[in-house]
Amino acid sequence: GRVKSENRQDLLIVDAINEAINARKKIAFQYFAYNIRKQKKLRHDGKIYLISPWALTWDDENYYMIGYDSDENKIKHYRVDKMTKIQPTEEKRDGAEFFADFDMALYSKQTFGMYGGREETVTLRCENKLANVMIDKFGFDTAFSNITDTHFDMRVKVFVSPVFLTWIMNFGADVTVLSPDSVKDELTALASDVLAQYK
């Protein structure tokens, strides 16, 4: 549903990011979101993002740039179609140690549709019938523990966001968040908010 001019602009941005990746240089850009009037509004009052680009990926019909944020010392992702005023820099990119063993497929699974959120290690208790679902989502090497005739536990790194929380809710009583308490609290608060809308 996007107009052709926007599609062309996305491809130009992809080209600029690829050039920066190949040149091992940082890029500067602004990032925006749409408001209620479908107008573009720059995030953080037009802040200039200075990011080391390392990869491009296609997920859920959108391009994403995966990069390293030196200020926050962590990997981040940005939707290409929400990036604007991209400028190449002469500053050498950093974050190589974070990407030495980077697994793009695993990262994409963990982000649950690339909606972001903070990274947490979450312990889940799952009904045994969901073993295959969890392996598909988190990978074959994900360790199961406390295995019984009815359930198993697993510890996984995820990006906690409403997308993750609603994904958990899809399983009803078949999946329980055991820890951390902060994620349990967020899940119960979200469920309460949903229920309140129908009272």
Image: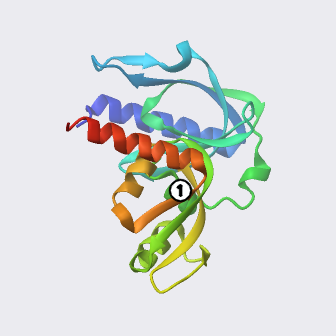
Taking the image as shown, residue 30 lies to the left or right of residue 61, namely right
**How crowded is the residue under tag 1: few (<14 C-alpha within 10 Å), some, or many (20+)?**
many
Q: Quadrant of residue 34?
A: top left
Q: Residue furthest front?
A: 199
Residue 3 image offset from top left, x and y in percent? 25, 31
Residue 193 image offset from top left, x and y in percent? 34, 37
Taking the image as shown, residue 9 lies to the left or right of residue 194, namely right
Q: Quadrant of residue 153?
A: bottom right
Quadrant position of the C terminus in the picture: top left
Taking the image as shown, residue 67 lies to the left or right of residue 127, namely right
Of residues 107 and 168, which is closer to you in this image?
Answer: 168
Count of marks overlaid on the render: 1
Position above or below: 13 against 143: above
Query: What's the residue at 26%, 34% (across, down)?
Result: 2
Query: What's the residue at 27%, 33% (across, down)?
Result: 4
Residue at the disc numbered 1? 110
Quadrant position of the N terminus in the picture: top left
Position above or below: 143 against 17: below
Position above or below: 95 against 147: above
The kind of residue tagged 1 is Gln
Taking the image as shown, residue 4 lies to the left or right of residue 43, namely left
Q: Label 1: state its secondary structure.
A: helix
Query: What's the residue at 51%, 44% (across, down)?
Result: 185
Asked whether residue 171 is in view, the answer is: no
Of residues 37 and 53, which is closer to you in this image?
Answer: 37
Of residues 80 and 12, which is closer to you in this image?
Answer: 80
Residue 65 image offset from top left, x and y in percent? 55, 42
Q: Residue furthest bottom?
A: 149
Protein image colouring: rainbow
Q: Quadrant of residue 156?
A: bottom right
Position above or below: 4 against 195: above
